[in-house]
Amino acid sequence: AQTVTQSQPEMSVQEAETVTLSCTYDTSESNYYLFWYKQPPSRQMILVIRQEAYKQQNATENRFSVNFQKAAKSFSLKISDSQLGDTAMYFCAFMPGGGADGLTFGKGTHLIIQP
Amino acid sequence: DTAVSQTPKYLVTQMGNDKSIKCEQNLGHDTMYWYKQDSKKFLKIMFSYNNKELIINETVPNRFSPKSPDKAHLNLHINSLELGDSAVYFCASSQDESSQETQYFGPGTRLLVL
């Protein structure tokens, strides 16, 4: 079984700053995928970014990028030029190849963007 | 158009009752899931289902049962509700069970058992 650990229960930064959310995982799988999901107060789960483990290049989506260190089993999310609308819970998630077992989530990081 | 929808959004009921939460996806996906988010925001897979196979998380009590009338729907039935069942339940879908496919989540159903 795999585990996902998010060691920062809560973070707070000023608007326009850059913030990095950490995530580590443990697995014996060689083929897997990693995701970051955002959950704003509306409760909706929104995909922020995904990374295929076989790809060495770090994924980027506009202001969001990841630092994927496969050997260290680390998958951090960097948010540049943070905006008030980025305030939300952020969940790191793991899915092994095959996917039928569903996503394994970390406990989440509550990110607060201060004006 | 809503990709993954759930009804109801809120459900308040008494202990011991039987209730259902409906989920529908209009994405043409083959695989659907149910997740439970507890009061501490922890999300955990309950079921995954496609037209071939139901996979049940071993920690889910057998009072919970998914039922799929067709490929676009995966409803969650809960018998003999208990206080500990209070949570937010999310339905999700993906193109197939391959992890290459992103899962799209419904808006969640907040269940409160009194």
Image: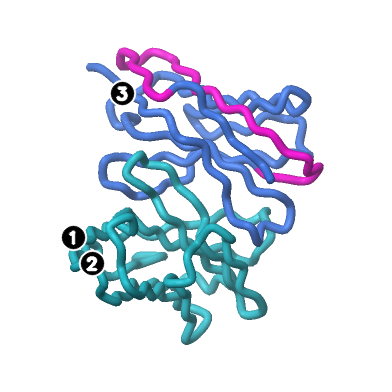
Chain colours: A blue, B cyan
Look at label 1 and name its amino acid. Leu
Which residue is labeled 2 in the image?
B15
Disc ID at residue B42: none
Using the rendered image, report if marks 2 and 3 lie on a common chain. Answer: no
| Mark 2 residue element | loop
Q: Left or right: A34 with respect to B25?
A: right
Q: Taking A74 as reference, is B61 above or below it?
A: below
- Chain for mark 2? B
Indicate the quadrant where residue B53 lies: bottom right
Q: Left or right: A81 with respect to A55?
A: left
Q: Do the residues labelled 1 and 2 touch (CB within 8 Å)?
A: yes
Neighbourhood count class around disc 3 (C-alpha, 10 Å): few under 14, some 14–19, many 20 upward: many
Residues rendered magenta in the picture: A9-33
Which residue is labeled 1 in the image?
B114
| Mark 3 residue element | strand
- Which quarter of the rendered picture does the C terminus of chain A lie within? top left
Q: Taking B24 as reference, is B40 above or below it?
A: above
Residue B65 at x, y percent in the picture: 46, 74
Magenta span includes A70: no
Measure the C-alpha gap from mark 2 to mark 3: 36 Å
Look at label 2 and name its amino acid. Met
Which residue is labeled 3 in the image?
A112
